[in-house]
Every structure is written in C-alpha cells, then in structure tokens.
Image (tube, rainbow, N blue to C red):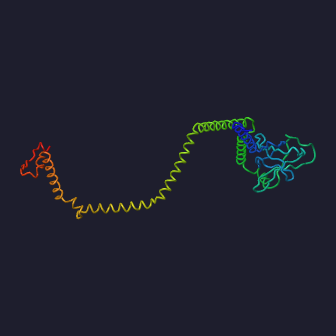
Amino acid sequence: MKVSREVKTAVLVLSGIALFIYLFSYLKGEDLFTNTDTYYTQFDYNALSMSSAVTVKGNKVGKVEDIKYDFKTGKTIVSFSVNPQLEFSKNSIIRLYETGIMGGNALAIVNAYDGQTAKPGDFIQSEVQPGLITSLRKNFSGLSADLDSSIRTADTLMSNLNTLVIDESSDGIKATIAELNETLRAFRSLSISVQGMVKQNENKIAGLLENFENTSSNLDSLTLELKEAGLSKTVANLDKTLIALQDVIGQVANPDGTIGKLLNDDALYNNLESATKELELLLLDIKLHPARYRRILSKKEIPYEEPTEDQMN
C-alpha cells in the first residue's frame, strides 16, 4: 500500500511533538514512562540540585524533583520521588550526604523499620551526614547578619530562577506545543510553496540542466580539439610571425633602406607627382583629340594644343 505524502508528514510532525515533550520532561527531571511516589523533607540550607539521586543502602531508587525556599520558616523544602515498590517507615530519616568532591550531594533513606509505613505526600525528617557540609552548618551561626542576608537573597534568586525555568503547569507545556505546531505549520507551508514552484518550473529546470550538460560537453570537446590541434605550436608560430613582421616594419622605418628611401625621399614623390600629372594630360588629350592618335602613321601632323581649364574640369 502506498502511503501518501500527507500521512508521512503527519507522522513526522507527531513524532517530533512526542520527542519534544519527552525531552522537555527529561530536562525537568521527570520520566513519563515510570510511576513514582513523591515525599517531602527539609534542610537548613540547600546543598542539592535538581535530579540529585535518592538512594537506599547505596542503590538509587529515586531522584530529587523540586527544591523550594520557604520564606516563613527559612527552610529549604525538598520534594523527592522514589519507586512505588519501595516501602519504608514514616519514622525513617532522609540523610543528606556527600557523594564525592566532584560528585555533588545526594539523599539517602535510612529506614527505621518501626512505626507506620510512609505514604506518598508524607513529610520525612532529615539529617546531614558529618563532613564538610556539617562543618559549614556548625559555623553558619557565627557568620555575620549581612552574610546571612546575602545567602538568603541568593537562595531566593535561585528559587525564582527555578520557578521561571521549571514550568510544571500544563499551560506552559500547551503553549510550548502550540508554538511548535505554528513552527511546523510554517515549515509545511514553505515546503508546499517550494514544491509547487519546482513543479511549475520543472520543464525549465530540466531544460536548464540539459543545456548546462550540453555546454559542459561542448567545452570538453573544444578543449580536447584545441589540445589535439596543437594550440601551443600555433601560438609559437604566431609569435615567430609577429617577430618577423616587427623586423619588416623596422626595415621600412629605416631611412637608409630601399623601402625607407621610397617612403622618405621627397624627390621621388615630386617625380611621381609630375609623371602622374603628365599622364593625366596625355589621357585628357587622347580623349579630346582621338583622331590625332589614330593617324600616327599619317604624314599629316596635328599640332598639340594646351587644354583649357573647362576641358580639364
């Protein structure tokens, strides 16, 4: 069965939208194909990042979903999600620990194995593992009020930035998808326009390509013919001919040469002019008195008369 171009385009558009939604959710730290349970805890300060690992006995079972600053209590509220198969007591402790110098921090669930089982949405108590973070916490009370205010302000700024970047509302996703749809429609309209223009000028484009191919073939043939005809030899012969012609011109311009004397001698010019004039008078006389030259053998001589100016004109 032949699939139409419109169906292919629709499948491509839908695949692009699905991929965009998946990547958008992945950047937000969400997995569309996995169900999770969400719990909450709090700390005196924030030492975590989005998608930080949540572990049980060193095994990753979840990740940090959201970090917010509570302006009323001055605490950092952390929401994290875990695999729904994991069951732990509500009396358990959420421990903040260091994963390494370059590895950042993570949360560990320390199960108490007593009391009620924690349910999604419950608030779990927290602690900080002794280490660099603990030292910072112990010295935190000794810092000045200005430093405390600066840190809280920076915390607020990061929280606001997170709010701007991480849009959990459905309206944000809908707006993004709508913009993507508009972009895809524009691309589709452009593609249809280009396709129509190409279809309308298909014959012209084919003729242009054919002419270009013929021209290229003719150029190849001409190049081959010139190569076989010995163009370099022809150019060399022409160069020799020009040199010989230059020598001839030089001899003509030489006043001591035969041709130079003929061209530059005034006496020769005057003699030629005089001879031409006499020849002109002779022809005029033959024209005016033809009988004189028909009776050359006659004893009667006809005297020569100088032609008048009217006769000469």
User: Residue at the spot x=30%, y=62% of the render?
Assistant: 248
Please tell me whether residue 17 is drawn above or below residue 277 in the rendered image.
above
Q: Quadrant of the C terminus?
A: top left
In the picture, which quadrant includes the N terminus? Answer: top right
Residue 132 visible, this orientation = yes
Q: Is residue 231 left or right of residue 13?
A: left
Q: Where is residue 29 shown, x and y percent of the image?
A: 77, 45
Observer-nearest of 175 and 214 = 214
| Residue 75 makes an appearance in the image | no
User: In the picture, residue 268 is in which quadrant?
Assistant: bottom left
* x and y, in percent, of residue 106 in the image: 80, 51
Residue 88: x and y in percent read: 90, 46
Q: Is residue 296 left or right of residue 3?
A: left
The image quarter in which residue 181 lies: top right
Q: Nearer the viewer, residue 57 or 283?
A: 283
* Farthest right residue in view: 114
Residue at x 55%, y 40% (from the top left corner): 204
Choose between 17 and 205: the one closer to the eye: 205
> Disc count in the image?
0
Residue that protrudes farthest toward the front in the picture? 298
Camera-nearest residue between 270 and 52: 270
The image shows residue 274 at horizontal and vertical percentages of: 14, 54
